[in-house]
Image: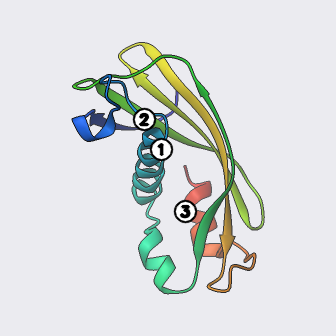
Amino acid sequence: MADFYLEKRIYYHDTDTGGVVYYATYLKHLEEARTEYLRSLGVDTAAYGQKGVLFAVVHLEVDYKCPARYGDIIKISAKIEEMGNASIRFKQEVWKGEKLLLSAKLVLACIDTNMKPKRIPEEMRAKLLSR
């Protein structure tokens, strides 16, 4: 398990008509956990975005293991596995108690406002490597 977790409750708007979390909703939860993880390391992605340093998901693998349901409390992990010159590879998981619900691997690309690859700024790299 990873070092960073975001705990959330599953609400009605997260679910389908059967009360099971809609598969695409997990992407929102993964995004929130990554954002909070980066914030915990001192990286404010919104502030970097205002400076023209943006991030886009360019690759995503998701393995759904078990569903979460309306009212459940879940924990979403976020961990950096590797950092390149202009990309960051994350591993993320969603847990309900001791039960693994989902595992994901994804790559964020650092881009500029013209959607062109951009080197990760050195001050951000230093914060991310301090993890």
Residue at 28% from the left image edge and 36% from the top image edge: 8
- The answer to which quarter of the image holds residue 4 is top left
- The local secondary structure at tag 1 comes to helix
Against 13, is 10 above or below?
above
Q: Position of residue 121 (x, y in %)?
A: 64, 76
| Mark 1 closeness class: few <14, some 14–19, many ≥20 residues within 10 Å | many
Nearer the camera: disc 1 or disc 3: 1
- The local secondary structure at tag 2 comes to strand
Q: Label 2: which residue? A: 76
Identify the disc placed on residue 127: 3
CB of mark 3 within 8 Å of CB of mark 2? Answer: no
- The local secondary structure at tag 3 comes to helix
CB of mark 1 within 8 Å of CB of mark 3? Answer: no
Identify the disc placed on residue 30: 1
The amino acid type found where label 3 is placed reads Lys
Instruction: Tell me which label, 3 or 2, sits earlier in the chain.
Output: 2
The amino acid type found where label 1 is placed reads Leu
Give the spatial CA distance, label 1 vs label 2.
Answer: 7 Å
Against 8, is 121 above or below?
below
Identify the disc placed on residue 82: none
Residue at 31% from the left image edge and 35% from the top image edge: 7
